[in-house]
Image: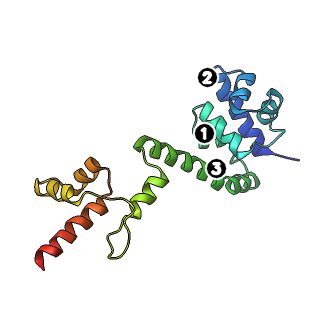
Amino acid sequence: MDKPISLKVGQRIRMRREEIGLDTQTLAELIGVSQQQMSRYETGINAINIDKFFQITIQLNTPINWFFIGCYHNVESSYELMRNLDSWFFIEQAAVQAEHRRILGRTNKDYQETKSIEFKPGRKKIVDVDRERVLSLFRQGKGATEISREMSIGRTTVYRIISKEKEEFLT
């Protein structure tokens, strides 16, 4: 079976691995495969599992697209590449987003908790917010972003408290 992309990608993995001074055994251990399996990847005998490929890109500190340089030599291999690129791009994008969330210290759970805070009559609040403190900070001239950071609550929550206070003041 002709696997031009697997062969090209494998050659690029070997080139980059040697460039940074890693031996086959070390890279294999880092990504959790045997040395023989790593050799099969590099020679194009076996196609690389997307998860393992992603781990290789991390260990070699190389962007995913670098491994596909030279793969566009004919229409058939370009088609094969395009079939797989969407899933590889998705994995790279997910990793970048996960890193951003880690850096920002936010998780999906934090986002969902912030999103679920509502001030509707008859509805129980999930997080008890000190309204007086929000209003006090607002009266001191602090903006919603600054208040939300200081109190570790969402800006939307700050806006809702301020607008509710304005409504009560006008009635």
Q: Secondary structure at mark 1?
A: helix
The one of 104 and 21 positioned closer to us in this rendering: 104
What's the amino acid at mark 3? Trp
Give the residue drawn at x 64%, y 49%: 88
Residue 114 occupies quadrant? bottom left
**Placement of the C terminus among the 4 image quadrants:** bottom left
Location of mark 1 (residue) = 66
* Residue at mark 1 to residue at mark 3: CA–CA distance: 12 Å
Q: Earlier in the sequence, mark 2 or mark 3?
A: 2
Mark 3 neighbour class, 10 Å CA radius: few under 14, some 14 to 19, many 20 or more: some
- Residue 40 image position (x, y, % from top left): 82, 34
Location of mark 3 (residue) = 88
Residue 21 lies, with reference to residue 13, above or below; the image says above
What's the amino acid at mark 1? Trp
* Residue at mark 2 to residue at mark 3: CA–CA distance: 23 Å
- Residue 83 image position (x, y, % from top left): 70, 57
- Of badges 2 and 1, the one in the foreground is 2
* Residue at mark 2 to residue at mark 1: CA–CA distance: 15 Å
What's the amino acid at mark 2? Ile
Location of mark 2 (residue) = 20
Q: Secondary structure at mark 3?
A: helix
